[in-house]
Structures are given as structure tokens and as C-alpha cells.
Image: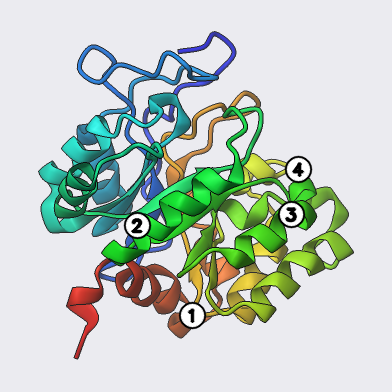
């Protein structure tokens, strides 16, 4: 692990808020262990090992039923650790992969069988090298044939430039971590209004109201981030997801207590109906559609 990064919380609290039965942590990761699943030689950071056993124990500790595991940049396009975790979890997990343009149809089919349901396009320059957009377009055209969707990760200053490209992509687009807004500007700032408008004008765009620990200026209990998440939950109740982001790679200022993160949920989804959509209905419809068809 990089010397200036923090390891995940060793003993998170039991949340005061009890998630409803069937709740999904729709954004989390597995890292390594490096002696079994080596990190990419091209990685921009080295995380602590965070194996599947720790993730599934956390799921149970926090009161969740399922996980959506997202491939992070430190493993590059080698999805072996992700697939291994999915195969262990079976129907209790789904995955978001990162693939190269030369990925074969057989490889995509094998990932689909393991439970991968999306690919991630990362535009955060401090985490990945720049990728020509035509490469992403080619991947998008291939994975939509499998019924997969696209997860995108970017930061707020890049939205204006990215928006035309994002709206050109096929199928459902899920934006990680609310598009990384600058929370010091407030949830009514024109910058965040731009993101709200993007979602209002494109009903295929979803969002994860996750990662207050990354966005906060004030620190726990993340009062400065709550208005952003609540605004999205209230405006787009059928297109929001929530996740822990465990094990919180690249954190330097503080390492969140995952139980405390769960306790933010009733502050951003203030009704039982909103919480059910956020934690069960929406992720199930997106990642387990075969279980939601009548």
C-alpha cells in the first residue's frame, strides 16, 4: 500500500440505521490479495489488500444482502479478482468490469456468465491514462449487445466537455459519486445545476449518491454532502443507487467508518419508499433484472 494512504477501518460500528431486507451495496471493490491477484504494472496507486472475504463479512455486518463490485484502476483490465469474487458470491453479487478494446467475445461471455453486468469508463486523469473516446465507443457498442450498461467516473470540472460524449453512448449510463461535485460551492450552485440538468434531459442517466467521505470539506458526519445526495434522490428517485465504496482507496485525510456511512442513508432518502427504491428496487432492476420481471 502507498505510504500516504490509509487502510480500511478495522472495526466499523453496527449502523444505527437498519437497511431493509434485500438491500444492495451498489459500489464496492475487491483488491488482491496481491500474491494471488497482482496489481497492474500501469497502476497510479497501490491499495491495501481487501479480499472478497473481508467484503462479504462487511456486507453482513452492515446489514446488506448483496454487492455490486466495481473493478478499480489498480487492477487495470485484469478482472480476475473481480470474477473470482463474483463466482464465490453467486447470485449475491454482480460486477462492473474494465476491459481493453481487444477483449474477445469469449472473454466477455465468460464475464457475463460470472455476473458482470457493466463496464466502467474512467475519465479521472490522476487515476488513469487518457483513452481516445472512440475506444470507449467501440467497447460500448459491443457490451450493449450483452445487455450491459456503462458506468462513468469523472470530476465536475470535466462535465461540460464530457456531456456531449456521454449523451452519445448507448443504453443506461451510471455516474459514479454524483460526478464529484465541489461541495464547498453548495448544492444550488450552477455547477451542480448543470449535472441536474443533464439527468433531467436524459432519462437513461443514473447516479450513485455515494462517497461523502471523498467529497466532504467538513468531515464526518458529512453535513456538507447530504444536500447534494438528497437533491438527487428527491429529483430522480428511480435512477439513484447507493454504495459504501469500501475499502475506500486513495483516502489520505480520514478513513470513514462504514457503519457511519450507512447512517447517512436516512438523511438523504427521507422516506421508506425512497429508501426502498435507492437500496433495493433500483439496483435490482439494473443488476438482477431476471428477478424483477413479473
Left or right of 250: which side holds 68?
Answer: left
Vertical order, 95 against 125 (above or below): below
Q: Earlier in the sequence, mark 3 or mark 2?
A: 2
Left or right of 70: which side holds 107?
Answer: left
User: Quick check: marks 2 and 4 in contact, CB under 8 Å?
Assistant: no
Find disc 3 in the rendering and name its residue. 159
In terms of image quadrants, where is residue 17? bottom left
Indicate the colouring scheme: rainbow
Find disc 2 in the rendering and name its residue. 143
Q: Earlier in the sequence, mark 2 or mark 4?
A: 2
Cα separation between marks 1 and 3 = 22 Å
Residue 121 screen position, x and y as percent = 51, 46
Query: Which element carries disc 3, helix, strand or loop?
Result: helix
Q: Residues within 10 Å of mark 2 (few under 14, many from 20)?
A: many
Find disc 1 in the rendering and name its residue. 238
Front: mark 1 or 3: 3
Residue 78 screen position, x and y as percent = 31, 29
Q: Earlier in the sequence, mark 4 or mark 3?
A: 3
Vertical order, 1 against 170 (above or below): above
Query: Which element carries disc 4, helix, strand or loop?
Result: loop
Q: Residues within 10 Å of mark 3 (few under 14, many from 20)?
A: some
In the drawing, what numbered circle is on residue 218? 4
Residue 50 screen position, x and y as percent = 32, 27
Amino acid at each position: 500500500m502507498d505510504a500516504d494512504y490509509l487502510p480500511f477501518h478495522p472495526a466499523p460500528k453496527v449502523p444505527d440505521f437498519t437497511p431493509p431486507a434485500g438491500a444492495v451495496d451498489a459500489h464496492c471493490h475487491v483488491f488482491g490479495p496481491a500474491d494471488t491477484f497482482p496489481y497492474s504494472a500501469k497502476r497510479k496507486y497501490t491499495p491495501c489488500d481487501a479480499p472478497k472475504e473481508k467484503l462479504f463479512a462487511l456486507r453482513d455486518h452492515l446489514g446488506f444482502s448483496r454487492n455490486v463490485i466495481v473493478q478499480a484502476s489498480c487492477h487495470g483490465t485484469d478482472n480476475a479478482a473481480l470474477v473470482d469474487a463474483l463466482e464465490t458470491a453467486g447470485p449475491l453479487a454482480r460486477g462492473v468490469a474494465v476491459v481493453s478494446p481487444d477483449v474477445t467475445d469469449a472473454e466477455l461471455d465468460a464475464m457475463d456468465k460470472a455476473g458482470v453486468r457493466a463496464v466502467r469508463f474512467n475519465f479521472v486523469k490522476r487515476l488513469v491514462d487518457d483513452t481516445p473516446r472512440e475506444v470507449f465507443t467501440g467497447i460500448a457498442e459491443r457490451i450493449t449487445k450483452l445487455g450491459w450498461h456503462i458506468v462513468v467516473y469523472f470530476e465536475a470540472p470535466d462535465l461540460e466537455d464530457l456531456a456531449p460524449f456521454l449523451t452519445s453512448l448507448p443504453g443506461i449510463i451510471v455516474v459514479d459519486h454524483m460526478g464529484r461535485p465541489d461541495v464547498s460551492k453548495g448544492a444550488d450552485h450552477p455547477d451542480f445545476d448543470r449535472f441536474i440538468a443533464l439527468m433531467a434531459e436524459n432519462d437513461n442517466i443514473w447516479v450513485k449518491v455515494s462517497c461523502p467521505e471523498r467529497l466532504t470539506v467538513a468531515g464526518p458526519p458529512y453535513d456538507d454532502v447530504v444536500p447534494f445526495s438528497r437533491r438527487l434522490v428527491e429529483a430522480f428517485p428511480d435512477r439513484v443507487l447507493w454504495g459504501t465504496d469500501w475499502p475506500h482507496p486513495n483516502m489520505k485525510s480520514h478513513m470513514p467508518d462504514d457503519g457511519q456511512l450507512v447512517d447517512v442513508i436516512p438523511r438523504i432518502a427521507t422516506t421508506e419508499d425512497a429508501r426502498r427504491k435507492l437500496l433495493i428496487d433500483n439496483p435490482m432492476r439494473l443488476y438482477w433484472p431476471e428477478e424483477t420481471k413479473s
